[in-house]
Amino acid sequence: MRRLLPLLLVLLVLPLLSGSATAAPTSFPARIDLPDGFQPEGIEAGTGTTAYVGSLRDGAIWRGDLRTGEGDPTWAEPVGAPTVGLAYDAQHGLLWAAGGPSGQVRAYDAETGELVRTYTVPGSGFLNDVTVTQDAVYVTDSVVQRLVVVPFGPDGSLPETATTLPITGDFVYGAGFNANGIVDARGYLLVVKSSTGELFRIDPATGHSVRVDTGAADLRNGDGLLVRGSTLYVVRNQDDLVVELRLGPHLLTAEQTAELTGDTDVPTTATFVAGRLYVVNARFNRVADPTTADYWITRLT
């Protein structure tokens, strides 16, 4: 009997070990489902493996862990106005959101989801995407030829009101969506013009723009922008791909190096988490009823 006891213990423990291994969640899943009808647009990385996704339907913000795929779709409660582009502000511990046609720029506590401040900018067309520098928050307006700016005080404090900065120089607005994705790089702002696929470098102090020579790269339907080192990623929403470009000196040139595709359906914006590239799928014009359709996040690398 003493000789049989060790064997019986092994036979009892093995199924338990096997079952726990089977039940373990996949680390960094390739697809993370969002709630049906969520209507996402912006995605942004926070601390660690945290990411945020905003809803066009009601402005709610999903906060989740991309390592596990688990998230809370009402981390930030609905505000009755769209949440479009998002940007994480490590300096203030805030998450900034562009409010589309509402003309709002909103700031949330990045840990609790509490709405900290709302700036409403008169005369806005469609506030689309956001980037944060050491000095200010910059938001594109896809209809009115200007940037919305939330300037920080010398001590980093938030102002009472937002300001606007006219875009001058090479960037000239036309029909359709104009300034869309925005990202800060090397002391400048890079902005893509969705309707034509042109890329511009903008001086954040003056608003003066210079067209970036992108060679043969096609950036039409350009939406979200993302920079890592000397690499720029441009999400081309209706074309279901992300274009990778190498930025040249002074941001005056950019050369295409790759195209990334995957399980996407009109991806709009991108972010990096733990060295992996993610996009969120807005599914514009692809579903009969967007209020009940399924939506998801795709890992491309």
Image (cartoon, rainbow, N blue to C red):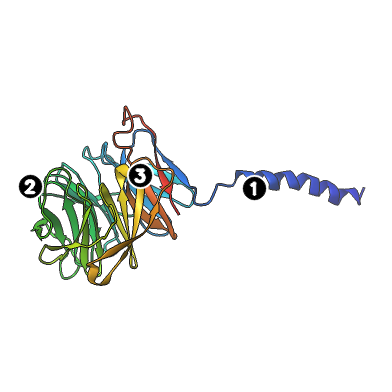
Locate residue 293, reporting x and y percent.
36, 31
Which numbered disc flags the more N-terminal residue, 1 or 2? 1
Q: Quadrant of residue 45?
A: bottom left
CA–CA distance between discs 3 and 1? Answer: 35 Å
Q: Can residue 61 be seen in this view?
A: no
Q: What element carries label 1?
A: helix
Q: Mark 2 belongs to which amino acid?
A: Pro
Q: Which mark is residue 21?
A: 1
Question: Mark 3 = which residue?
Answer: 240
Q: Is residue 78 visible?
A: yes
CA–CA distance between discs 3 and 2? Answer: 34 Å
Q: Mark 3 belongs to which amino acid?
A: Asp
- Mark nearest the camera among 3 and 1 is 3
Q: Is mark 2 on a helix, strand or loop?
A: loop
Q: Quadrant of residue 171?
A: bottom left
Q: In which quarter of the image is residue 79?
A: top left
